[in-house]
Amino acid sequence: SDKLTQPPSVSVSPGQTARITCSGDALAKQYAYWYQQRPGQAPVLMIYKDSERPSGIPERFSGSSSGTTVTLTISGVQAEDEADYYCQSADSSASYHVVFGGGTKLTVL
Amino acid sequence: EVQLVESGGGLVQPGGSLRLSCAASGFTFNSYSMNWVRQAPGKGLEWVSYISSSRSTIYYADSVKGRFTISRDNAKNSLYLQMNSLRAEDTAAYYCARAYCSGGSCQWYFDLWGRGTLVTVSS
């Protein structure tokens, strides 16, 4: 299956740890990528190849992978982290090529 | 400044056509594969199309295959999306997105996005 499943919403208080999961068969053999999208803005790459962090992304953002599930972890959540988060995978040999999860709305209480 | 700027969106009737443009600046455009990604109002991201740096490889999502055509002009640092036979379900913000490329090899994720252009298909 080419579907990636994310929880619609996650809520945490400032300073706590947020974990956003993404599940799908494609993740067993392909890397996952994570994007942050604030309201009215374009997506920003936060994690690539499951757990790598692009330059300029705060260290509190991390990624991990286990089987068909990947997790984006945000440690010490800040108010500015409130946004939608999307996982993505790709398989150029598959008919879908690129697939995104449905997105998770992170609310900082 | 490294950036992508989309243009060409607007209101179009069902069955109509529209051509989107994406102007790239601040990087060597002809070294990068490019993509279009769209987002319906209040919905998630949907990949639409891909074109390699040399234009030799092109892919489409099943939802737009046969109706949309991606192209690029490396001399003008520009990416295009010709959209024909538009439907209400094509209503979305359309983003131009650069694939991550290094050492002549490109990956299937996006390290630079434009701010998007809104396409509304309605009578």
Image: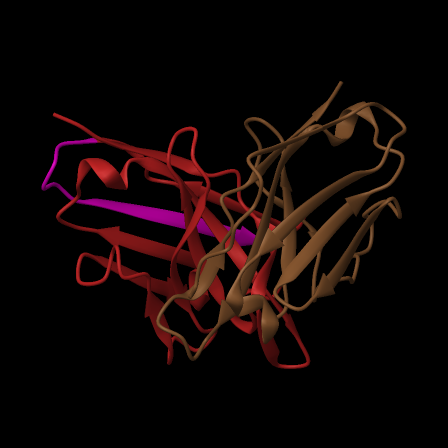
**Residue lying furthest front:** A67
What residue appears at the point 58 percent right and 32 percent down from the top-left corner?
A41
**Residue lying furthest top:** A109
Chain B colour as displayed: red
* B17 lies above or below B101: above
* A15 lies above or below B102: above
- Decide whether the magenta segment is chiefly helix, strand or loop: strand
Which percent across, then down, holds residue B41?
39, 30
Placement of the C terminus of chain B among the 4 image quadrants: top left
User: Is residue A35 visible in this depiction of the protein?
Assistant: yes
What residue appears at the point 27 percent right and 61 percent down from the top-left corner?
B62
Quick check: is B19 in the magenta stretch?
yes
Left or right of B102: which side holds A91? left
Left or right of A92: which side holds A109? right
Quick check: is A64 in the magenta stretch?
no
Residue toward you, A109 or B15? A109
Residue toward you, A25 or B123? A25
Total labels: the figure holds: 0
What residue appears at the point 38 percent right and 64 percent down from the top-left corner?
B72
Looking at the rendering, which quadrant does residue A75 occupy?
top right
* A99 lies above or below B103: above
Which percent across, then down, holds residue A102?
49, 44
User: Is residue B77 visible in this depiction of the protein?
Assistant: no
Residue toward you, B77 or B109? B109
Chain A colour as displayed: brown
Q: What's the image's color scheme?
A: by chain
Which percent across, then down, holds residue B21?
37, 48
Which percent across, then down, holds residue B121?
21, 33
Which residues lie in the magenta part? Answer: B12-25
